[in-house]
């Protein structure tokens, strides 16, 4: 069993506001054994895997971290691009599989950003929105400079800062934005908590559908790259 299983098993229980004792009783095992499963200290058998999937009404693939969708579906081109976009892309002269991959990657990022800004609108935190926006802007700036760098003949005069300084400053700038975002997020007053939306897999899927799966796939891919 992988690390995703223990994390997701605990996440599902907490999202449903179940005590470990209650979940263990319903699943027909000792609380200590469920604790071991949730902490990754023990591996469960296939029978428990299926029982837990039925209990939480999710797929075994989701429990195992093989998909970001609770129903076990996997992201397809049609979930990211419309049929019209796919048809238009494939008709382009010289269009290749690599181009399609780049377009799909772009659409996934756009979908993820859309979800993030929709959530920011609900949180109504101007400082957090400003910090996240500047973080995104600096990231786009850095990526553009990296693409520009790919051809030595590209005119560097379109930039006002030398490349080495730009990259280092952008990293520092993103760190500052991240710090401001953390401070803004932590300034929530207890009285405001009941009005804030609760982010769970169920709430994301209910509001954003396939877009939520795209965002969680980006999360999964990022965490894989980090680890």
Image (tube, rainbow, N blue to C red):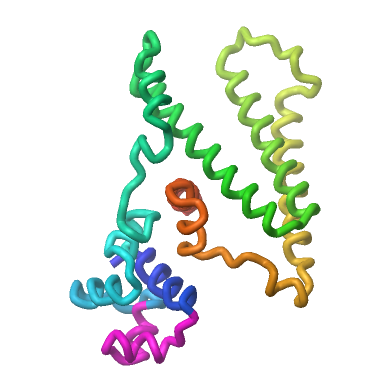
> At x 70% / y 36%, what residue is drawn?
137
From the viewer's perspective, is residue 154 above or below residue 168? above
How far across and down, in percent of the image, does residue 56 sit?
35, 73
| The one of 177 and 131 positioned closer to us in this rendering | 131
- Tell me, yes or no, whether the highlighted magenta stretch contains residue 36: yes
> At x 36% / y 14%, what residue is drawn?
91
Residue 195: image quadrant is bottom right
Viewed as shown, does residue 55 lie left or right of 46? right
From the viewer's perspective, is residue 187 above or below residue 159? below
| The one of 191 and 21 positioned closer to us in this rendering | 191
> At x 79% / y 53%, what residue is drawn?
126
How far across and down, in percent of the image, does residue 140 sit?
65, 32
From the viewer's perspective, is residue 136 above or below residue 192? above
Q: Main secondary structure of the magenta part?
A: helix
From the viewer's perspective, is residue 95 above or below residue 163? above
Viewed as shown, does residue 94 lie left or right of 122? left
Viewed as shown, does residue 214 lie left or right of 195? left
Residue that sits furthest to the left in the current view: 47
- Tell me, yes or no, whether the highlighted magenta stretch contains residue 6: no
Viewed as shown, does residue 175 lie left or right of 97? right
Q: In which quarter of the image is the N terminus?
A: bottom left
| The one of 107 and 131 positioned closer to us in this rendering | 107
Task: Give the number of callouts.
Answer: 0
| Residue bounds of the magenta highlight | 17-37
How far across and down, in percent of the image, does residue 72 sit?
30, 56
How far across and down, in percent of the image, does residue 188 sit?
76, 68
């Amino acid at each position: 069993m992988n690390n995703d299983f223990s994390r997701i098993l605990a996440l599902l229980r907490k999202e449903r506001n179940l005590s470990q004792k209650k979940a263990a009783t319903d699943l027909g095992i000792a609380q200590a054994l469920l604790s071991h499963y949730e902490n990754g200290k023990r591996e469960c058998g296939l029978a428990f895997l299926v029982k837990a999937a039925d209990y939480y009404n999710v797929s075994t693939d989701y429990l195992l971290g093989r998909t970001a969708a609770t129903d076990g579906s996997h992201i397809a081109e049609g979930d990211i691009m419309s049929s019209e976009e796919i048809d238009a892309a494939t008709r382009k002269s010289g269009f290749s599989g690599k181009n399609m991959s780049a377009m799909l990657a772009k659409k996934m990022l756009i979908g993820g950003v859309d979800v993030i800004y929709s959530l920011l609108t609900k949180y109504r935190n101007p400082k957090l929105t400003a910090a996240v926006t500047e973080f995104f802007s600096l990231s786009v700036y850095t990526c553009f400079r990296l693409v520009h760098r790919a051809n030595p003949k590209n005119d560097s005069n379109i930039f006002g800062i030398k490349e080495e300084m730009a990259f280092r400053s952008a990293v520092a700038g993103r760190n500052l934005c991240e710090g401001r975002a953390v401070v803004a997020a932590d300034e929530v007053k207890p009285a405001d908590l009941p009005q804030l939306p609760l982010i769970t897999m169920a709430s994301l899927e209910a509001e954003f559908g396939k877009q939520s799966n795209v965002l969680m796939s980006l999360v999964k891919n990022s965490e894989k790259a980090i680890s």
